[in-house]
Amino acid sequence: MDLNTVLDVRDARSPVPWRPGDAWLGGGTYLFSEPQPHLRRLVDLSRMGWEPVRELPDGSLEIAATCTIAQLSRFGKSWDAPAAPLVEQCCRAFLASFKIWNMATVGGNLCNALPAGPMISLTAALDGVCLLRAQDGSLRRVPVADFVTGAGRKDLGEGELLRSVTLPARALTSRTAFRQASLYGLGRSGALVIGVLDPVDGSLAVTVSAATVRPFRFWFPLPPAPGTLREVIDAAVGADDWFDDIHGLPAWRRHMALRFAEEIHRELTADAADTADATGSADAADATEATPPGGLR
């Protein structure tokens, strides 16, 4: 769509004072999808030269706001971290063509703050933290789960820029489980739930998104009883927090989110128990082989 109210497009590498009617331009897939009568100038981020995805020395992962979905997908396919499958699962949760994949950015998906945004789901589930830069150059960090505050609402000041999202190393070593539902075969997500099981301390995080106006991330030091998980979600997500639009009624979204949460709980805890049993059996076998008859050494 032509934005006929836009009078100027500036390169973000040449900073200019921010003024009313300005907007950051990433991939532009949202900006050019509908009229933007309030805009007068676009500040283009496409030539900033930020590395799309990079692994930091501490093992964490930094995803630039300008990283496209196609770039993130390619990285996820070649990445060998335990949480790697989740990247492609969330990329595939987009209702988007390959043309959108090659233009839409991770930062744009977060800043649009739409309930069905799968990059919100991915980064919130993996305990991601947004790096925000104000016009005066000051920086602040906000967890993704707190950055999106409602449908189309985010914790972003006037002229503030989302620079990147960092996923901590601990989360990347976790085992994950993914569930997504839509009313249509290729429709927008009506419910998207992700489970993350920490291999170090056994803690479980369950993130509910798409079904709700913002992501809800529930963390348990140990996996709770299935009934407890349902009660905790129901207590935290109020009636007005279940999203309501043409892609799903609140009652259906709640039903699917609770069902998926219980399925994910069973999947991750059952796999953890199987791993523990296998490890215990192997240890017992090793001990049997190493111990002579009668227990003498």
Image (cartoon, rainbow, N blue to C red):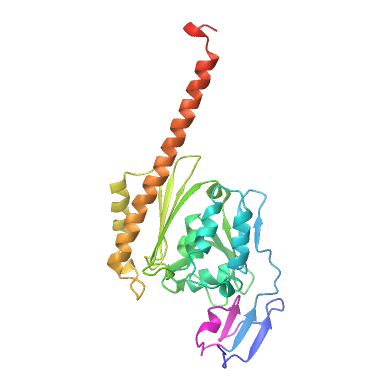
* Numbered-mark total: 0
Residue in the picture at 61% in, 87% down: 41
Does 42 appear above or below 271?
Answer: below
* Quarter of the image where one finds residue 236: bottom left
Does 224 appear above or below 16?
Answer: above
Residues shaded magenta: 19-39
Which percent across, then down, holds residue 5?
56, 93
**Viewer-nearest residue: 28 or 101:** 101
Which percent across, then down, holds residue 161?
59, 72
Residue in the picture at 33% in, 67% down: 242
- Asked if the stretch drawn in magenta spans residue 124, the answer is no
Residue 137 horizontal side relative to residue 265, left or right: right
- Asked if the stretch drawn in magenta spans residue 20, the answer is yes
**Viewer-nearest residue: 224 or 104:** 104
Which quadrant does the N terminus fall into?
A: bottom right
* Quarter of the image where one finds residue 97: bottom right
Which quadrant does the C terminus fall into?
A: top right
User: Does residue 128 show up?
Assistant: no
